[in-house]
Image (cartoon, rainbow, N blue to C red):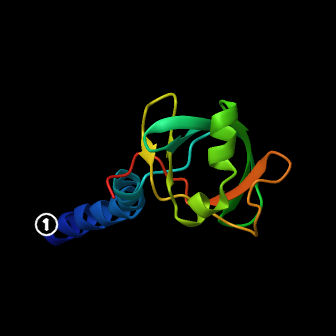
Amino acid sequence: MSLDWIAFSVAAGIGILWMFVKPAIQRRSEIRKYGQELGEPFAAEVLYQGDAVADLSDRDFVEMFWREYRIDPRSAEAKEVIENDDLWDECAFDFRDPATGNLCSSGFVGGRRPFIRDGKILLRALYFGGSE
């Protein structure tokens, strides 16, 4: 066996290995940068000015990027805050994973006013734990 054949075999092996390893490395890098959706069972807190005002649960995948959530206010005052459609339009709410404390400030509301109907709300881009 020639030295050229051994060098070629090693290079080919490294190339094949890289084809499988590179996507995993890229995915982990994207998660660190942009965050990721929470797993099941879904639970998140809705924050307004740093205070938890409601809880999200019962995620339903509506379309490719849109998710519908059950939203439960934590108090009567909190109910008034989360039912203020102007605040949703202004993206005034943040979201927190109660298990890890990771934050999401990229989420935004969809649909027409009133945004909360029958205790449900349509949201997009709830990605937790990213650096951006």
Location of the N terminus by quadrant is bottom left
At 65% from the left and 30% from the top, the residue drawn is 74
Task: Identify the image quadrant of residue 70.
Answer: top right
- The residue carrying mark 1 is 3
Describe residue 117's horizontal placement relative to residue 49 as left or right: right
Q: Closer to the camera, 118 or 79? A: 79
Q: Quadrant of the C terminus?
A: bottom left
Whether residue 62 is situated above or below residue 32 in the rendered picture: below
Rendered view: 127 above or below 65: above
What is the tally of numbered marks visible in this picture?
1
Comparing 127 with 74, the one in front is 74
Note whether 69 is above or below 63 in the view shown: above
Q: Give coordinates of residue 11: x percent, y percent.
A: 24, 66
| Residue 111 appears in view | yes
Where 31 falls versus 100 (above or below)? Answer: below
Point out residue 14 in the picture as x, y percentages from the top left corner: 28, 61
Left or right: 91, with 18 as reference point: right
Q: Secondary structure at mark 1?
A: helix
Q: Quadrant of residue 100?
A: top left
Choose between 31 and 115: the one closer to the eye.
115
Residue drawn where x is 52% and y is 30% of the image:
98
Q: Amino acid at mark 1?
A: Leu
| Res 44 seen here | no
